[in-house]
């Protein structure tokens, strides 16, 4: 299973773009990169995922390097509600068995 | 609203009690999961069901017993738990196809006294 490395914590000013890095240097060619976040006392919330192309949705953008060994989650205009722990995960398992292994994540704090 | 509903949200039980956690998903998914989240530790996968059949059991003690009667419902039956079993228990579901993400409920906060 490919492992991920994230900084334990980050701060970002409200209204600015929050850029969260993740290293996954042992990722395999068919493994996806997923991002989730968890706000205190709630379940993890799916944000975005990608294989090798950059992805964007209504919540965030995902930039994956060409060698796929690292990625960056971008929250374009951070708000106080974006304060949470953010998990970068590489998918493991076979078709029909979406087992995700969570690490310790990055605690993002949005500063007013 | 995540589409995955867990009840109860909070549960306090003694070590000799028997209780059950319930999970229901309204997303039409065909795979369901139980995860455990203890304080200051990463999420731990406990059980995986795909098309109502258990496909993964990560060496969970027998005092935890899952049940998946259909693709929309998942239960976790608890008996003779230990205080160290106190944690947030999370249910999730997915489409079960390659690349599809998991959708989580808000969990049951369990305290064993």
Image: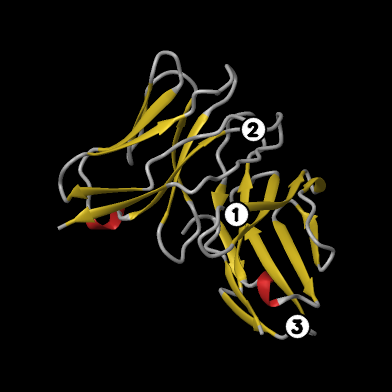
Residue drawn at the location 59% of the way across and 69% of the way down: B108
Residue position marked by numbered label 3 in the rendering: B15
**Which of the 4 image quadrants contains residue A38?**
bottom left
Viewer-proximal residue among A98 and A24? A24
State how far apart marks 2 and 3 are (Cα): 35 Å
Dot 3: element: loop
State how far apart marks 1 and 3 are (Cα): 33 Å
Question: Residue B95 in the image: x percent, y percent?
Answer: 63, 39
Residue position marked by numbered label 2 in the rendering: A92
Question: Residue A61 in the image: x percent, y percent?
Answer: 33, 32
Q: Nearer the viewer, mark 2 or mark 1?
A: 2
Residue B77, above or below A72: below
> Which residue reaches farthest top?
A66
Dot 2: element: loop
State how far apart marks 2 and 1 are (Cα): 25 Å
Report the chain holding disc 2. A
**Which of the 4 image quadrants contains residue B110?**
bottom right
Callout 2–callout 1 Cβ contact below 8 Å: no
């Amino acid at each position: 299973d490919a492992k991920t490395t994230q900084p334990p914590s980050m701060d970002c000013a409200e209204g600015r773009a929050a850029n969260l890095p993740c290293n996954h240097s042992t990722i395999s060619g068919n493994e996806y990169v997923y991002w989730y976040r968890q706000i205190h006392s709630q379940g993890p919330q799916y944000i975005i995922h990608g294989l090798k192309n950059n992805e964007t949705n209504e919540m965030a953008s995902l930039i994956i390097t060409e060698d796929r060994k690292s990625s960056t989650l971008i929250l374009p205009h951070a708000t106080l509600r974006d304060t949470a722990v953010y998990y970068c995960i590489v998918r493991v398992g076979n078709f029909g068995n979406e087992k995700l292994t969570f690490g310790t994540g990055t605690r993002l704090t949005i500063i007013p | 609203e995540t589409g995955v509903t867990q009840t109860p949200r909070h549960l306090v039980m003694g070590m000799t009690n028997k209780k059950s956690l319930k999970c229901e998903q309204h997303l039409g998914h065909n795979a369901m999961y139980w995860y455990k989240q203890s304080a200051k530790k990463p999420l731990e996968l406990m059980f995986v069901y795909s098309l109502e059949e258990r496909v993964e059991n990560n060496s969970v003690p027998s005092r935890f017993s899952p049940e998946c009667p259909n693709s929309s419902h998942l239960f976790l039956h608890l008996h003779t738990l230990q205080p160290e079993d106190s944690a947030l228990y999370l249910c999730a579901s997915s489409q079960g196809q390659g690349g599809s993400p998991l959708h989580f409920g808000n969990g049951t906060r369990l305290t064993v006294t």
